[in-house]
């Protein structure tokens, strides 16, 4: 099975791109951080990303979803982010890479879980805030640079999906396959 990572900063248009890929018949694995945030907020934690266990909670859910998805009988799968994104998130938040995150990064490398090309969805040039997305445009652009640096440091080739209509982004991704 070929597994590709689709990444980008909050508000870049990843989710709608993934929904279109899913609609086109591709297998899609959901991202974890937003769900970890939403669950914690439902439990009364206003800013769960400030909790020391946040990074490890994201890693655990990512690993669970990736391992469940590995059982699917498909040739091609798109993952909405990965543990490499979580390493970028840790850097962005200014927290160290935890032992759980380091172990997961090593496992992904050792098992060659993902293709070495990653699709980075470029920021659209604006941010629409949500309860889970409280990042401004300046920080989103900084986060995008951290993602790019982190993926390169982990040996990935980056395919940029530039801003534009959804159909153009989907076609650019399909051409790159």
Image (spheres, grey):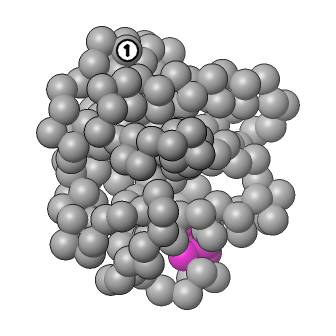
Q: Position of residue 96 (x, y in %)?
A: 18, 26
Q: Is residue 119 above or below residue 51?
A: below
The answer to whether residue 109 is visible is no
Front one among 173 and 11:
11
Q: Secondary structure at mark 1?
A: helix
The magenta stretch is: 169-173
Front one among 175 and 66:
66
Q: Residue at x 48, y 68 (%)?
A: 130
Front one among 44 and 158:
44
| Residue marked by disc 1 | 100
The answer to whether residue 17 is visible is yes
Q: Residue at x 35, y 83 (%)?
A: 126
Q: Residue at x 42, y 62 (%)?
A: 133
Residue 174 shown left or right of residue 156 in the figure: right
Looking at the rendered image, the quarter that the N terminus falls into is top right
Instruction: Tell me, yes or no, whether the highlighted magenta stretch contains residue 116.
Output: no
Front one among 8 and 158:
8
Residue 126 shown left or right of residue 60 in the figure: left
Q: Position of residue 54 (x, y in %)?
A: 39, 31
Q: Residue at x 30, y 26 (%)?
A: 52
Query: In the figure, residue 24 lies in which quadrant?
Result: bottom right
Query: In the figure, residue 50 lies in which quadrant?
Result: top left
Helix, strand or loop: magenta stretch? helix
Q: Position of residue 95 (x, y in %)?
A: 19, 32
């Amino acid at each position: 099975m070929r597994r590709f990572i689709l990444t980008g900063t909050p508000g870049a248009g990843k989710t709608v791109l993934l929904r279109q890929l899913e609609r086109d018949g591709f297998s899609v694995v959901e991202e974890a951080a937003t769900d970890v945030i939403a669950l914690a907020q439902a439990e009364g934690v206003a800013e769960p990303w400030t909790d020391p266990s946040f990074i490890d909670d994201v890693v655990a859910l990512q690993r669970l979803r990736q391992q469940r998805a590995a059982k699917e009988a498909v040739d091609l799968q798109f993952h909405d982010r990965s543990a490499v994104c979580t390493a970028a998130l840790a850097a962005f938040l200014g927290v160290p890479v935890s032992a759980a995150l380091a172990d997961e990064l090593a496992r992904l490398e050792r098992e060659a879980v993902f293709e070495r090309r990653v699709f980075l969805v470029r920021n659209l040039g604006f941010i629409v805030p949500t309860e889970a997305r409280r990042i401004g445009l300046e920080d989103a652009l900084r986060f995008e640079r951290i993602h790019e640096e982190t993926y390169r440091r982990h040996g990935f080739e980056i395919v940029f999906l530039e801003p534009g209509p959804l159909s153009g982004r989907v076609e650019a991704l399909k051409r790159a396959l």
